[in-house]
Amino acid sequence: MQERNQTCLGCHQARARIGWHASTHERSGVACADCHRIHQDRDPVLVKSSEPDVCFSCHRQKRADFQKPSTHPVRFGLMGCSDCHSPHGSTTTAMLNKPTLNQTCFSCHGDKRGPLLWEHAPVAEDCSLCHTAHGSLRNALLTKTPPLLCQQCHAPADHPSVARTSQSLPGGSAGGSVFLVAGGCTSCHSRVHGSNHPAGAKLLR
């Protein structure tokens, strides 16, 4: 493998490949020709619409993730794996293009970056506290469905937020919350990433 790669790396030593040595792919015994097709007019891994299929040949779980209802638009050819990841090596977790996960997300989702007058702490800390990167069965790539997601950090002290059942709805015997009739915390707290509204302390507006 090293001999095969050295043929390529003898010429291709540009900035994009400076992290190849000691990268996850290099340590896993991946050869340049495992991903690239030389002597072809169009190398599939260099074309955004066909690049994911090359990556999925090894990363099979990610192929399954991108078939879920809520995903980034990779399967539609609008994004490639290299929009977020650096296949030739990176000093970051998961070989990300940017130094942190949040910076990687903010390169597209700049409206979530702030600065915000009222900031929701998890947004600045780590996007993956609430979202999964590749695919989810829930809307907006959420890891859990509200209110369960919110209740990982927030206690239902101000208003009881129990699960929606026939017993928990208004008039039921379990003392359910009228605030969850429409489906979750975000029915009222719609500015979950943060707010610049003077009255947005509770992320309501």
Image (spheres, grey):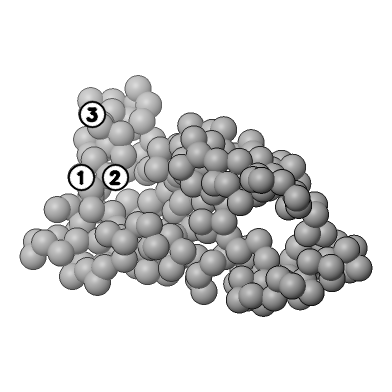
CB of mark 2 within 8 Å of CB of mark 1? yes
Q: Cα distance, mark 1 to mark 3?
A: 17 Å
Residue 28 in the image, given as x and y percentages of width and height: 82, 62
Quarter of the rendering containing residue 95: bottom right
In this view, the mark in front (3 or 2) = 2
Amino acid bearing label 3: Pro
Instruction: Look at the numbered disc 2 and give the secondary structure of its residue.
Output: helix
Q: Residues within 10 Å of mark 1 (few under 14, many from 20)?
A: some
Point 37% across, 26% down: residue? 165
Point 57% across, 47% down: residue? 47
Amino acid bearing label 1: Cys
Quarter of the rendering containing residue 116: bottom left
Whether residue 73 can be seen here = yes
Residue at the disc numbered 2: 185
Q: Which mark is residue 188?
A: 1
On screen, residue 115 above or below 51: below
* Of the pair 201 and 160, the residue shown nearer to us: 201
Residue at the disc numbered 3: 170
Q: Cα distance, mark 3 to mark 2?
A: 16 Å
Query: Residue reaching furthest top?
Result: 166
Instruction: Look at the numbered disc 1 and give the secondary structure of its residue.
Output: loop
Mark before the other along the chain sequence, 3 or 2: 3
Apparent side of residue 65 relative to residue 26 in the rendered image (left or right): left
Residue 166 in the image, given as x and y percentages of width and height: 35, 22
